[in-house]
Image (cartoon, grey):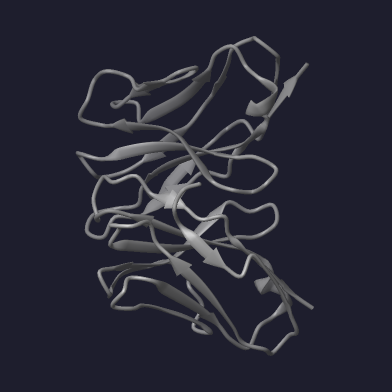
Amino acid sequence: AQTVTQSQPEMSVQEAETVTLSCTYDTSENNYYLFWYKQPPSRQMILVIRQEAYKQQNATENRFSVNFQKAAKSFSLKISDSQLGDTAMYFCAAPSGAGSYQLTFGKGTKLSVIP
Amino acid sequence: DSGVTQTPKHLITATGQRVTLRCSPRSGDLSVYWYQQSLDQGLQFLIQYYNGEERAKGNILERFSAQQFPDLHSELNLSSLELGDSALYFCASSVGLIGNTIYFGEGSWLTVV
């Protein structure tokens, strides 16, 4: 993707509540994969969820789910029943282009879960 | 634990010096990627190797170089270091080229003083 945009630099949510992080991307690919990664204070990059663009069904991983709108090139992450351990930077990633596969990352959304 | 191993975890060096960062991909992964994350910056793609061959280049400086060896481990060489090179350098790996999940190592913290 030439650009991956995360429009919310920072967000906060009360513990046990639900929060949605936004992401839009631009790609010329037809079949591709999208990812959300989490980076806690330890700075490790941890895969949260993956979406295959050719699948209409939104991906779900436990409390994490996505709302994938292919035509709109939108890929938001919903976190349900937020936990303190969800406090982290969240990065959306989309493919950079044809040929060798690489990801372009958004600038990230800093999520704080408030007890 | 992602299975991607990076060494060293922390490194402090002086301007003008050269350092080598090492990465062992997950077992079975043929692709290795290097990313740079500076303070207040997102992840910048540097370079990708697949089964020993360079496959893609991003915003990698000419002072930086990388290679992937026959045993699939990779090294990122940073030379003539400048203060602005201080960053967290991630290695990541995936099974193939297209559509595979990319798993990240814990990163190597480089501080140039």
Q: Determine whether, in the image, residue A5 is placed left or right of residue B48.
A: right
Residue shown at the point (25%, 55%) measured from the top left = B97
Q: Is residue B81 above or below residue B95?
A: below
Picture coordinates of residue B102 (x, y %)? 38, 49
Q: Which residue is drawn at 79% across and 78% down?
A: B113
Residue at x 37%, y 63% (from the top left corner): B32
* Residue B108, image x, y percentages: 61, 65
Reply above or below: B81 against A87. below
The image position of residue B56, as x and y in percent, is 32, 67
B1 vs A82, nearest the viewer: B1
- A41 lies above or below A12: below
| Coordinates of residue A105 in the picture (x, y in percent) | 48, 47
Q: Can residue B59 be seen in the rendering of this structure?
A: no
Instruction: Report the side of A41 relative to B76 (left or right).
Output: right
Which of the two residues, B103 or A107, is positioned nearer the viewer here?
B103
How many numbered discs, if any? 0
Vertical position of residue B41 compared to residue B81: above or below: above
Looking at the image, which residue is at 44% across and 46% down?
A3
Front-most of residues B25 and B33: B25
- Decide which of B65, A16 is in the foreground and name it: A16
Instruction: Please say whether residue A44 is visible from this viewpoint.
Output: yes
